[in-house]
Amino acid sequence: EDQVTQSPEALRLQEGESSSLNCSYTVSGLRGLFWYRQDPGKGPEFLFTLYSAGEEKEKERLKATLTKKESFLHITAPKPEDSATYLCAVQDTGGFKTIFGAGTRLFVKA
Amino acid sequence: NAGVMQNPRHLVRRRGQEARLRCSPMKGHSHVYWYRQLPEEGLKFMVYLQKENIIDESGMPKERFSAEFPKEGPSILRIQQVVRGDSAAYFCASSPPGAGANEKLFFGSGTQLSVL
């Protein structure tokens, strides 16, 4: 069964303090790995799709990387507006549903 | 171009009543997904629909829950005889037609269901 585990559950950073969020996954065959951002009271917002090991994607202060077993979301010099829950998700080649992890709640203090 | 619209935003029901949650996908999108989210938990897949067809309902409870996406009108998630454990945020997402298109989901703001 497809599984996604994210760590840490929560992360508190000072503004400008870079760090990484981890996503470990298990799928029979990976169609894609996704990162979403979710703000309180809102639905998730798409950030990145990664398809194969070694692939990297960047957007502003965020960079996502992928290996055969895990993905990292690197946050460089975060700002308070980066505070949100970051969700990792996978889709396997055998179906069309996207399976989400429980998320990492990021708090960035000015 | 309006995003995914869900209504109501908040729904309060007493135990035993029915709850109907509505979702209008983005214009041009023909795939709809329903997810459920409990506090401190991730999104749990419930059902995937295309117009007039249920494609994957492997995440739907066998009893009391049903979903439809008619040819005209919004998708409906229906919960009959609600219980306190049904209290959660229910999110709808949509994606456009075409191979690979369902890899990127566009989410609505959710319906918060509270069962008294």
Image (spheres, helix red, strand yellow):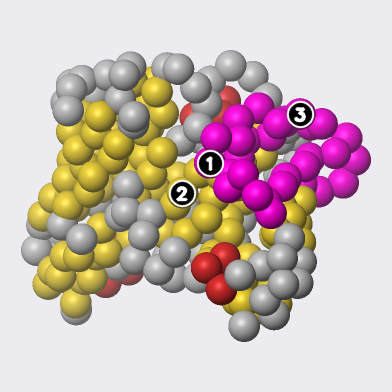
Tell me the tag on residue B59.
Answer: 1
Does residue A91 show up?
Answer: yes
In which quadrant of the rendered view does residue B96 lie? Answer: top right
Dot 2 lies on which element?
A: strand
Magenta region includes residue B97 = no
Q: Position of residue A18 (x, y in %)?
A: 10, 57
Dot 1 lies on which element?
A: loop
Magenta region includes residue B66 = yes
Instruction: Give the crowd class for mark 3: few <14, some 14-19, many >=20 residues within 10 Å.
Output: some
Amino acid residing under circle 1: Gly
Quadrant of the frame with the N terminus of chain A: top left
Q: Which residue is mark 2?
A: B44
Q: Tell me which segment is drawn in magenta.
A: B47-75
With B32 as the anchor, is B85 left or right in this view? Answer: left
Instruction: Give the crowd class for mark 2: few <14, some 14-19, many >=20 residues within 10 Å.
Output: many
Q: Position of residue B1 (x, y in %)?
A: 72, 48
